[in-house]
Amino acid sequence: MLHSTEHLPPGWAERYRAGIDFSWAFVLEPAGVDRTRFVFRTRARLRPWWVAGLYRALVVPADFVMSRQMLRGVRARAEATTDVDLARLDDEAEQPGATATSSK
């Protein structure tokens, strides 16, 4: 999960008592045999009302486009993964001190 409260221009929190509190969750859920469902959730708490209005009018549409493209990229990489890739990851995980991000 990612969490951020730093999405306001400098000084707005103090001057206008404005606040934006975002969180993003990336969840993998089992979806049957050899399948996994990737769930992307986002939440925001906004104050005051005019910040919420600007957020809904300007940020939500842009966030939708960016999130959709991100999920398409994740899907493309997941569907391109082969048995050889998975075997390599298993081999790396069995090596002492190895991480899933190490490369050969």
Image (cartoon, rainbow, N blue to C red):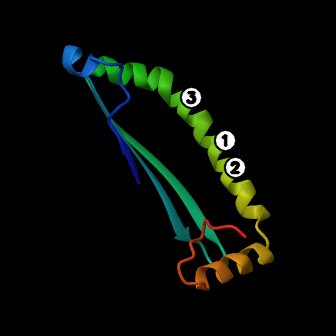
- Label 1 close to label 2 by CB (< 8 Å): yes
> Label 2 belongs to which residue?
73
Mark before the other along the chain sequence, 3 or 1: 3
Please give the label number shown on residue 41: none
x, y percentage for residue 85?
A: 75, 73
**Residue type indicated by callout 3:** Ala
Determine the secondary structure under disc 3.
Answer: helix
Q: How many marks?
A: 3
Q: Is residue 37 above or below residue 18?
A: below
> Label 3 belongs to which residue?
62
Please give the label number shown on residue 69: 1
- Label 3 close to label 1 by CB (< 8 Å): no
Q: CA distance from mark 3 to mark 1?
A: 11 Å
Q: In front: 55, or 23?
A: 23
Determine the secondary structure under disc 2.
Answer: helix
The answer to which quarter of the image holds residue 23 is top left
